[in-house]
Amino acid sequence: MPYLSSILISMVLSLDNYLMISDLWKVSKVWSIPLGRVHYGRKVYYRYEDLSFSINNQPLSDSEAEQIRSALQIISRFLGTPQFE
């Protein structure tokens, strides 16, 4: 049974890696983030194609700013409640 467990763990980790990489590429397309792959031996790393690029330099849209304001308003309701201190 230990062998079967290690196979299942390996399959789950492979699926997790696949989903993570798939999500990474989707996000890069939606937010226009220039991602590139760097091969180092058998491993693949992901980084910005333009090393001077930073997501922090991207302006917020009006919709994103409103969503942040709304989230902060909801979170502020919990200030002062003992279970969230």
Image (spheres, helix red, strand yellow):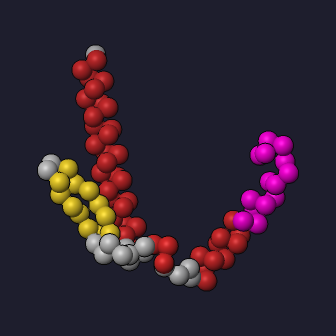
Magenta stretch encompasses residue 80: yes
Q: Would you place residue 9 above or below residue 58 in this image?
A: above
Any part of residue 83 in sight: yes
| Residue 44 is inside the magenta segment | no
Residue extending farthest to the front is 52
For the magenta stretch, what is the residue range? Answer: 72-85
Question: Does residue 43 appear left or right of residue 70 in this picture?
Answer: left
Question: In the picture, which quadrant includes the N terminus?
Answer: top left
Name the foreground residue: 13 vs 53: 53
Residue 31 locus on image (x, y percent): 42, 75
Residue at image x 32%, y 56%? 21
- Relative side of 42 to 36, left or right: left
- The quadrant holding residue 14 is top left
The residue that appears at 28% across and 72% down in the rendered structure is 49
- Residue 29 visible in the shown view: no
Tell me the quarter of the picture where residue 13 sits.
top left
Residue 40 pos. (x, y %): 17, 54
Q: Decide which of 82, 19 is in the foreground and name it.
A: 82
Give the side of residue 63 with respect to residue 79, left or right. left
Compared with 17, 29 (above or below) is: below
**Residue at 60% in and 79% down:** 63
Is 60 above or below relative to 73? below
Residue positioned 34% across, 52% down in the render = 19
Residue 11 location in percent, x, y? 28, 37
In the image, residue 32 above or below residue 15 = below
- Say how many tags the image has: 0
Quadrant the C terminus occupies: top right
User: Which residue of the protein is positioned furthest toward the left in this rendering?
Assistant: 41
